[in-house]
Amino acid sequence: MTETQDLFELDGSGPLYRQIKGAIARPILSGRLSPGARLPSEHEFMALFATSRMTVNKALQSLAEDGLVVRRRPNGTFVAPQVSEHAVMDIVDIIDEVEGAGAIYGYRLLGHRLDPPPHPAFPSGSKLLHVTCRHDADGSPLLLEERWINGSAVPDALAESFETTPPNRWLLRNVPWSSAEHTIRAVGAERVCAGELRIAEGAACLRVERTTWQAETPITFVSLTYPGDRHQLVARFAPGA
């Protein structure tokens, strides 16, 4: 029970069901509980938090409504899988995308530091990890990634070096998300960006900016810049969809 107690800790603030909800949500958002992981039963939570089944049920139901957990009677409650249907476009693993096209993937970490929030979605005072990296395909630069990760919500990310594992893959494997917002625009390559992508300064690029949330908590903001002639976005729609 000690390991479970360490994982699910009440913060002593607000109604008990909200404290229980927060105690379960925190290890999910931090990545300590992986997508698909089975949670303790209602009876185990009742014993852990010394409360009624109604209080535990209320907390779990609220987590399910927020998309953090999935309740499957009679099998139990599980950490929700990735929910790509909520996004305008799927969030894909860049390594899988490159290798799926038959190319050899390459990766280079360019920067790793703590920075202030770059985007209004992050609360003031958030501890953000700023990671800059480049993804290559067959030895040529494919895209430049600038990513800010909410260390206050995902503290395990602060301990990651991202020297060999790209942040995109690490987040997809460790942190569930429930919604995302994309902005797509044409930009001219800035000096540093142009140098990394081996293109002329001011050359046409496609930039995808994405903010990802889990329930109401912002997890990450990323800017992906592609040389204009090396990437395309394709989506299929149906009437009314």
Image: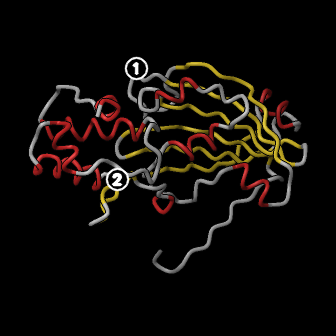
Q: With 17 as the anchor, is 65 left or right in this view?
A: right
The circle drawn on residue 69 is: 2
Q: Nearer the viewer, residue 237 or 18?
A: 18
Residue 159 falls in image quadrant: top right
Residue at 88%, 36% in the rendered image: 198
Q: With 231 as the anchor, is 213 left or right in this view?
A: left
| 122 over 52 or under it: above or below | above
Label 2 to label 1, Cα distance in Å? 28 Å
Q: Nearer the viewer, residue 116 or 28?
A: 28
Residue at 46%, 56% in the rendered image: 81
Residue 100 on image: x %, y %: 77, 60
Q: Nearer the viewer, residue 200 or 95?
A: 95
Residue 145 on image: x %, y %: 69, 37
The circle drawn on residue 125 is: 1
Residue at 36%, 54% in the rendered image: 78
Residue 174 on image: x %, y %: 52, 42
Q: Secondary structure at mark 1?
A: loop
The circle drawn on residue 235 is: none
Residue 96 falls in image quadrant: bottom right
Q: With 77 as the anchor, is 17 left or right in this view?
A: left
Q: Secondary structure at mark 2?
A: strand
